[in-house]
Amino acid sequence: MIPRYSRPEMVSIWSPETKFRIWFEIEAHALDAMADLGIVPKENAEAVWKAKDMAFDIDRIDEIERETRHDVIAFLTHLAELVGPEEARFVHQGMTSSDVLDTAFNVQLVRAADLLLEDMDRVLAALRKRAFEHKYTVRIGRSHGIHAEPVTMGLTFARFYAEMARGKARLEAAREEIRTGAISGAVGTFANIDPRVEAHVCEKLGLRPEPVSTQIIPRDRHAMFFATLGVIASSMENIAVEIRHMQRTEVLEAEEFFAKGQKGSSAMPHKRNPVLSENLTGLARIVRGYVMPALENVALWHERDISHSSVERVIGPDATVTLDFALNRLAGLVENLVIYPENMRRNLDLLGGLVHSQRVLLALTQKGVSREDAYRLVQRNAMKVWEEGKDFRTELKADPEVRKVLSAEEIDEKFDLGYHTKHVDTIFERVFGSAEG
C-alpha cells in the first residue's frame, strides 16, 4: 500500500526483514524438533541458530532469486552462506516450500489481526464515549432519507458500536481460523517429515497444526479472513456515510473537526468538506475489492497450484495495511466529531410536527376509529403541511373529525418528545451492558 495510507506498525509485519525472520524461525524450530527426534545431529540444529542475531541481506537474497527464480531456495542459499554449508546441510529436510510460505503467511495474518483488533478497540471506545455523551440528544430519524420519527444521537452511536462489536467478534473468529501451520511435506502426507516436527514448529509460533493439508493450507481459511475484513470495511463505511450526510449544509447536525489552517477547497475559501469520511468510503472499497480474489483462491488444482500465490502477495499486506490505517482514521474522526444539538432540534421541527403522525394515528385507533379512517384523517392533515406549509398540530385541532375523537389536550400530548426516548436505557443496557457511562 502507498505510504499515504499506511502506518509503520502494520507495514513492518509485511517487510522482507520480518518475512525472512519468520522463515528462519520455521526452519530453525523444525531442525530443533528433528534433532530431538534423532533425525539430524544436534550440533547442526544449534549451528543454524547462529543466524538468530544476524541481519539477512535482502539484496543478496534478491540477487540469488534472480538466478534461481525461486524465493525459498534463494533464502535457503543465503542462510547457508551465513551459517556455513555443512552446518546448514539438514535445513529444510523433508519440507516443501509451501511449508515455509504458508506457515509464515499465517503468522503474519495473525499478527495483523492483533493490530486490527487493537484498532477496533479504539473505534469502539470512541463510539461508546460519544454514545453516552449524546444519549438523550434528540435528532430526527430518517428512512429513505426522509424524516421519520425522533431518535437520539446516542442511539446512532450505540448502533454503530454494536455493529463494530460484531465486527470485532468476527475478526477474533477469523484470527483463530487462520491460526494454523503446516509442515507436512510435498503433498501433505508427512512421508519425509515426522508430524511431531509440525507440532513443535506450530507451538513455537503460536499456531495450531492444520488437520489436513495438501502441499498447502486450505484457502477457505484465508477466504474467511479476508471476507471478515471486507465486512468490517463495510461497517466502517456505514459510519462514514452517516457522518457525510450529517455534514451536508442543509443538515449540519455534525461535522468533521476543521483544524486551524486547514483548507477545504483550492477555489472556494468557505468550504469545510467531509474529506475524512469520503476517504474512508474509498478505502472501504479497496478492502472489499480484495475479498473476491480470496474467495477465488479456494479452488485450486489437486494438491495445489500457484494461482493463489500472486494474489496473496498483494492482498495480504494491502488489505491489512489499508484497514489498519482506515480504522485509526475512523477512530480519530469519531473522537473529534463536532456535534450540533441545536441544528438537530431545528431539523426535528422542520416539518411542522409531522414526525408525530404515528402517535396521532394510534391514538385515533385506540379511541375506536378504524385504522383505514384514522390513516385517512392523519394523512389529510399531514398533506397540508407538506404542500401548504401548515402546522400539523394546528391542523389536527381544526379538523372536526379528529376533534370528535381527541381533545386538544390529547392532541398536545402526542407531540411530547420524551415519549420517543423512554426506552433508551433499555437499548443501552442491551448494547453496553449498562445504561450508565
Image (cartoon, rainbow, N blue to C red):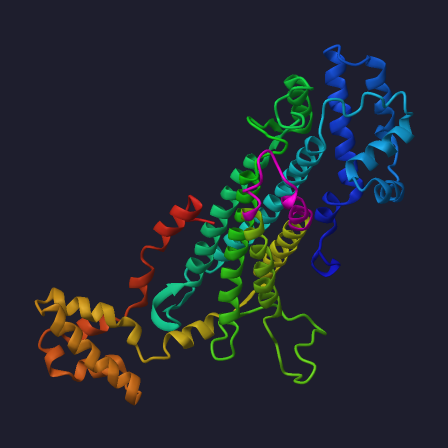
- Taking depth in this image into account, of 375 and 410 the one nearest to the observer is 375
Number of numbered labels in the structure image: 0
Query: In this image, 136 relative to 357: left or right?
Result: right
The percent position of residue 260, horizontal first and vertical second, equals 70, 72
Most distant residue in the top direction: 38
312 is within the stretch colored magenta: yes
Most distant residue in the front direction: 302
Residue 92: image quadrant is: top right
Query: In this image, 260 relative to 89: left or right?
Result: left
Query: In this image, 388 relative to 266: left or right?
Result: left
- Taking depth in this image into account, of 345 and 69 the one nearest to the observer is 69
53 is within the stretch colored magenta: no
Question: Is 198 above or below relative to 297?
Answer: above
- Taking depth in this image into account, of 220 and 332 the one nearest to the observer is 220
Q: In which quarter of the image is the N terminus?
A: bottom right
Q: Which residue is drawn at 77% across and 45% down?
A: 15
The percent position of residue 241, horizontal first and vertical second, equals 51, 66
The percent position of residue 233, horizontal first and vertical second, equals 55, 55
Most distant residue in the bottom direction: 388
Magenta extent: 296-316
Q: Residue at x 10, y 67 (%)?
A: 367
The percent position of residue 36, horizontal first and vertical second, equals 74, 12
Q: Residue at x 87, y 34 (%)?
A: 78
Residue 384: image quadrant is: bottom left
